[in-house]
Image (cartoon, rainbow, N blue to C red):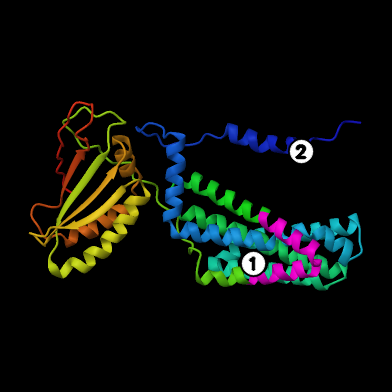
Amino acid sequence: MSPLPSESDGYLVPIATLWRRKWKVRSSSLPREPMRTAIYDGLRFTAMSSEIKAAITRGTLFGLASIAILALLPLVVRDQLGGGPLAYGTLMAGFGTGAVFAGISNSLFKRILSQERLMTLACFACAACSLSLALTSWLAVAAMAVALGGAGWVTAWSGLGVSVQLASPRWVVGRTISIYYALIDSGIAAGSLIWGTVAQTYSLTWALEGSAGALLLVAASGTLFPLRERRESEPDPLEEFNAPAVALNLKPRSGPIVVKLDYHIPEMNIEAFLDLMRERRHVHSRVGARNWTLQRDLQKPLQWTETFCTPTWTDYLRLNHRLTTEDKALDERILLLHAGEPPPQMTLSIERPPSSARKAERSVPYVPRL
C-alpha cells in the first residue's frame, strides 16, 4: 500500500504555480531599504492611518471574542451534547459549510451591503452561534449554529483584510498586512486563553455567553472604529519624481536634508490654507517626513513657511517617490490659495552642526515651480 500523502504535499501545486508565474515588477532607481528602516516605515504608516488602525482594532477584538466558538467546541461536544469524535466532526463540517457558503456569496453581499454593515452582521452571527451552543443540547441545532458562526467568521476576516489593503499604498501594503496578522493572531491567542480560563474557573455556559456579549460590543465599536468603505484600489505611487540638481556631491546617506517651502497666503484664504496644510502634514509624515512645522512670518504676516526634514538624501527621494496622484492633487489645491509671484519657492538644505568633523558644506537652495 502506498503511503498517504504528507500535509506538505498540498503546498506543492501553489508553490509551483507561483514559481512559474511571471510577475511584472516595477523597477526602482532607489537602493533597497534596510530592514530596520523598512519596519519603522511600516509601523509609522500604520500608526498614522486611521483606517488601518480601525481594521486592526476591530480584527483583534473580533478574534479575541469569537475564538471561543472553536476553542471551546470540544467541551461543547463532551459536556453539552454528550457526544464523541463523530459529533465533533459533524460540528466542524457544519462550520466549514457555513464558511464555504459565505465565501461563495461574499461578492454578492459586498455589492448590496457596506463593509461596516457586513462586519456588524458577522458579529451578530457569531454571537448567535456562541449563545446557541451555550443553551442547546441537540446536535442538529448545534450544527446549524456553528454553520452560522462559520459564515460570520469568513465574512468578518475577508472584509477586514480588504480594508487594510485598500488603505495601504502598494509600497507599504506587505508591511501593513504583516502588522495586521500579527495583532489579530495575538487577539485570537489571548481569547483562547481568556475563554478557556473562564470555562475552567466558572462554567462552559458562562464562557460562551460572555463570548456572545463581547461580540455584540465588537459590533457596537463600529461607532468608534468604523471600517473604510470599499473603493478602487489605492493608486500606486507616481514613481515619476525627478531628483533636483544640487551643487554638492551628495551621497545616498548624506543628511539630514531640510526642505522649506514659502507661501504667500491672503487673509481670506488662511482658514482654507490651514485645513489643507493639516492634511499635507499627515500625508508627508506618513511617507517619511520628520519634524514637520508651519511658520508664519511676524514681519510679513502673509508669508508662511512649511518645513520638514528627512534623515538622508535617499529618504528625501524615497518620500517623493511614495506620493500618489491624490497627494499631488492636494499640492494643486494648496497652490490655488497662493497669491504671490513667483509661485511657492522650495529651498533644499543639508544640516551641518558647527562641531562636525566633516568639511563644512553650505546650504544649497533649489527653487522649482510646483
Say left or right for 196 vs 291.
right
Mark 2 or 1 closer to N-term? Answer: 2
Query: Can the viewer see residue 288 in this picture?
Result: yes
How far separated are the C-alphas under marks 2 and 1? 31 Å
Instruction: Tell me the kind of residue under disc 2.
Output: Glu
Say left or right for 188 vs 277.
right
Residue 199 is a magenta residue: yes
Q: Looking at the picture, how far across and down is residue 370, in whole percent?
A: 19, 49
Q: On the image, numbered disc 2 is attached to which residue?
A: 7
Q: Looking at the picture, how far across and down is residue 290, in whole percent?
A: 32, 47
Q: Quadrant of residue 61?
A: bottom right
Q: On the image, numbered disc 1 is attached to which residue?
A: 122
Nearer to us in this view, 3 or 46 = 46
Nearer to us in this view, 318 or 313 = 313
Q: Main secondary structure of the magenta part?
A: helix
Up/down of 4 relative to 89, above or below: above
- Image quarter where the N terminus lies is top right
Q: Quadrant of residue 94?
A: bottom right
Residue 335 is a magenta residue: no
Up/down of 347 relative to 295, above or below: above
